Amino acid sequence: MRQPGAYSKLLSGGVSGKTGPHSLPLARIKKIMKKSSEDVKMISGEAPIVFSKACELFVEELTKRAWLITLQGKRRTMQKDDVASAVITTDIFDFLVNLVVEDRNNSTAAVAANKLG
Amino acid sequence: EQDRLLPIANVGRIMKQILPPSAKISKEAKETMQECASEFIGFVTGEASHKCHKEKRKTVNGDDVCWALSNLGFDDYSDSLKRYLIRYRDAEGERANQNKAAGGGGGSGGGGDRDDEVDAPPLPFSFNLMDKRRN
C-alpha cells in the first residue's frame, strides 16, 4: 500500500517539488555515467538519484548566470553565447570551456575566452 | 546519438522554471545546456570513480558522488545533496519496513554493491512521470 508520507518529505520545493521525485531519467543518467570512463564498472542505485538532483542544481546555476548575461545585453531570449559566456566567467565551470568554445576565431564567447586566455 | 545527452524537454523545463515567466530560451541554448549537463555528469563520475578505484571498491555510490562534487568545487550542491540522500535513504528504509510489515518479500536491498544490470530500486511514485521515452 502506498504511503504518501514517505516520499512527500523529498518533495521540498524547487523543481523536484513540482515534477515528481526526479526530473531527469535515471536510466539515461546511468548510461552517461558508464560512458564517461572505462573505470566505471558498477553503479549503486543511489548514484543516478544523486545526479538527478545535482544536474538540476547545475542546470539551474548555469541558467541563472547565463540569464544575467542575456539581461546585460538587454535581451529577453537566452542565446547559446550567453551560456558560453557564463561558463567562461565561472571558475568551477572551467571543465566546460572547450565544450562551449568551438570556434576560437569568431563568436563573442571565443573572444571572451581569448581575453581570459 | 541522443543516448549521451539528457532529454532536451527535461533540461528545458528545469531552465524555464528557474527563470522569470517572460524569459525565452533559444533552442541552441537548450542544446548547449544538454551538452554541458552530460559533461558535468562525466566529469564528476570520473572523479568519483577514481576514488573508488584507489580504495579498491567496485561500486560508485551516492556518497562517492557527493564527495566528488565537493572535491571539484561544487560544495553548495554537495551539502544540499547529502541532505537529499539522507531523506531518500530514510524513505527507502520506511518503505522496506512497510514491505516487511505487510509480510511481503521483495524490498530493494538498499545501497551497497549492486548488480550492473539492476536499475534503481522501485519507488512509490513512478519517476518516469515526466520522462518521455523516445526509442
Image: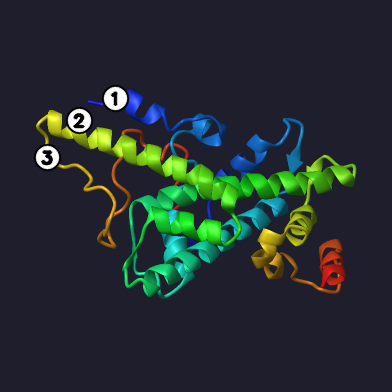
Marks 1 and 2 share the same chain = no
Is residue B1 visible in the rendered image? The answer is no
Residue B98's disc is 2
Q: Amino acid at mark 3?
A: Gly
Marks 2 and 3 share the same chain = yes
- Subunit bearing disc 1: A
Residue that carries the numbered disc 1 in the rendered image: A3
Q: Nearer the viewer, mark 2 or mark 3?
A: 2
Mark 1 touching mark 2, by CB under 8 A? yes
Residue lying at 58% horizontally and 63% vertically, measured from the top left? B39
Q: Quadrant of residue B123?
A: top left
Q: How far separated are the C-alphas under marks 3 and 1?
A: 17 Å
Q: How far separated are the C-alphas under marks 2 and 3?
A: 11 Å
Q: Amino acid at mark 1?
A: Gln
Residue B35 in the image: state x and y as whole percent.
61, 60
- Subunit bearing disc 3: B
Residue that carries the numbered disc 3 in the rendered image: B105
Mark 3 touching mark 1, by CB under 8 A? no
Q: How far separated are the C-alphas under marks 1 and 2?
A: 9 Å
Task: Give the structural element (helix, strand or loop) at label 1.
Answer: loop
Relative to residue A27, is residue A106 depicted above or below? below
- Subunit bearing disc 2: B
Residue B135 in the image: state x and y as whole percent.
43, 54
